[in-house]
Image: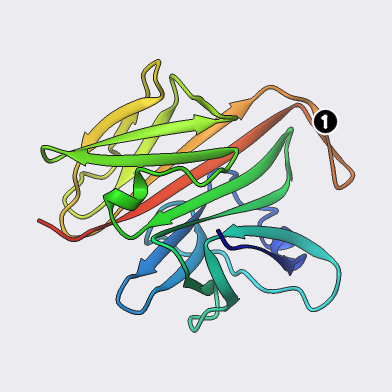
Amino acid sequence: MNRSTLLLSAALLAALVTQSDAHFLWIFTDQTHRRASFSIAEQPGADPIPIKIAPGKEGIKLDSVGFGKIAPGANGTGLEADLLKPSGAVRLPYRVFQDSLVTWWAKTAIDFKAAQSTLGQRYEMTASLAHGRVTVRVIGEGRPVAGCTVEVYGDGIPTGTTAKTDRNGQAEVAKAKIGTESFGVEIAVKNPGTYRGGTYRQRLEMVSLTVRVDQP
């Protein structure tokens, strides 16, 4: 599967200094044109934080799987890319925020069939559809993550909907209407260290998944 690395502007760090760490990197797909768009926001539809590509060697690296030709988006705040496979994922380490190292893990799929497969990310979600219900599975370091709270967004899903994963890392949630169903989960890992000159006591893995819903 296609893998690539993109250097993002260090200005992204400054832009997010005053923001909450509870932002996610979201990826949305245009299946007709096989395109994907990237944005950083607290939740889908919220005002995004601008993302810019670094002109030199200073910045933070966005590692991608399944995307090609990542470039600034037409809206001036996010990125766009070719979607080379039915699903794709990116990893974007952010910064040390307070006492936590924040890293974004974002994934997208054109349908629930594609969403069932893993893409080899250290942290990611899968989703499957059966009998009108969606089952989300949260995976971290190759193992299911139990007891974490998954935020659920989509047309027809009430605001503030969440679900907690069981011992198998799974949570059952309602299915959205036609459009996109989005999931976000924050995983705290007690693991002190240093990153770009900052010291942290834990890692915050901010994991998101978006899936196209084409049937009502």
The image's colouring method is rainbow
Q: Residue at x 70, y 53 (%)?
A: 17
Where residue 135 sits: x, y (%)?
27, 34
| Circle 1: residue type | Gly
Which residue of the protein is positioned furthest toward the front in this rendering?
1
> In the visual, does 214 lie left or right of 77?
left
Under circle 1, the secondary element is strand
Count of numbered badges drawn on the protein: 1
Please state, as top left, top right, bottom left or bottom right, where the C terminus lies in the image: bottom left
Where residue 105 sits: x, y (%)?
56, 47
Q: Residue at x 41, y 24 (%)?
A: 169
Q: Residue at x 69, y 74 (%)?
A: 53
Which residue of the protein is positioned furthest toward the top in this rendering?
167
Q: Residue at x 62, y 35 (%)?
A: 204
Q: What residue did someone put label 1 on? A: 193
Where residue 115 sits: x, y (%)?
35, 48
Where residue 92 sits: x, y (%)?
65, 53
Please state, as top left, top right, bottom left or bottom right, where the N terminus lies in the image: bottom right
Q: Quadrant of residue 56?
A: bottom right
Q: Is residue 127 above or below residue 72?
A: above
In front of the other: 9 or 29 = 29
> In the visual, does 216 lie left or right of 82?
left
In front of the other: 57 or 186 = 57
> In the visual, does 127 lie left or right of 52?
left
Question: Circle 1: is it few (<14), some (14-19), or many (20+) Cα within 10 Å?
Answer: few
In front of the other: 21 or 54 = 54
